[in-house]
Image: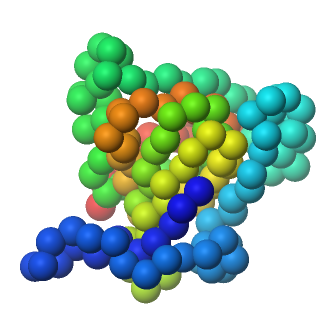
């Protein structure tokens, strides 16, 4: 996982100062590293601990049918009334999450990264250049997980 402020102003989009793991936690973003070999047991333990009831897996790649349509649902700023909880098994993804000061915090997740975007927190999701990710999604209630755009 790599995190940094993401600046979008008249000078163009660019990387700002780095954000360490502790700062990210202090901003209300829980995260952890979990080995991708034998991930099921620790993830199931986390589910019980945090009260998530179901999980599924999502795979996106350039060969995914309607990839751009799928991505377009989540690359605009939105929030959910439930946590957005992801564990990455392969590939990469980008979570842009609003800081307490309403700046973008860009979190690039890689295999072994577990992250929680808390409910009611504005964010967006993008793929990296490889446009490939295989992730586990954890849900409290799948019905609560719909985007509400800002
Ligand atoms: Fe989302």
The image's colouring method is rainbow
Q: Is residue 139 visible?
A: no
Closest to the observer: 64 or 112? Answer: 112
Q: Is residue 122 above or below residue 126?
A: below
Please indicate whether residue 64 sits to the left or right of residue 12 in the image.
Answer: right
Which quarter shows the C terminus? bottom left
Which quarter shows the N terminus? bottom right
Q: Could you tell me how many numbered marks the image carries?
A: 0
Q: Residue at x 69, y 29 (%)?
A: 55
Q: Residue at x 74, y 51 (%)?
A: 33
Please provide percent x and percent y for residue 147: 39, 45
Locate residue 66: give its quadrant. top left
Closest to the observer: 66 or 37? Answer: 37
Locate residue 132: give its quadrant. top left
Q: Is residue 150 above or below residue 101?
A: above
Please indicate whether residue 59 sits to the left or right of residue 61 in the image.
Answer: right
Q: Residue at x 30, y 47 (%)?
A: 75
Q: Residue at x 43, y 25 (%)?
A: 60
Closest to the observer: 131 or 86? Answer: 131
Q: Is residue 86 above or below residue 98?
A: above
């Amino acid at each position: 996982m790599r995190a940094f402020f993401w600046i979008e102003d008249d000078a163009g989009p660019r990387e700002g100062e780095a954000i360490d793991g502790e700062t990210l936690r202090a901003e209300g973003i829980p995260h952890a590293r979990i080995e991708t070999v034998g991930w099921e047991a620790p993830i199931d333990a986390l589910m019980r601990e945090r009260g998530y009831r179901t999980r599924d897996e999502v795979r996106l790649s350039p060969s995914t049918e309607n990839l751009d349509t799928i991505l377009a649902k989540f690359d605009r700023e939105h929030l959910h009334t439930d946590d957005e909880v992801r564990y990455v098994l392969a590939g990469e993804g980008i979570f842009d999450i609003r800081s307490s000061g309403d700046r973008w915090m860009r979190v690039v997740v890689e295999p072994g990264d577990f992250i929680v975007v808390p409910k009611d927190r504005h964010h967006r999701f993008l793929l990296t250049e490889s446009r490939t990710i295989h992730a586990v999604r954890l849900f409290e209630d799948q019905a609560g997980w719909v985007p509400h755009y800002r």
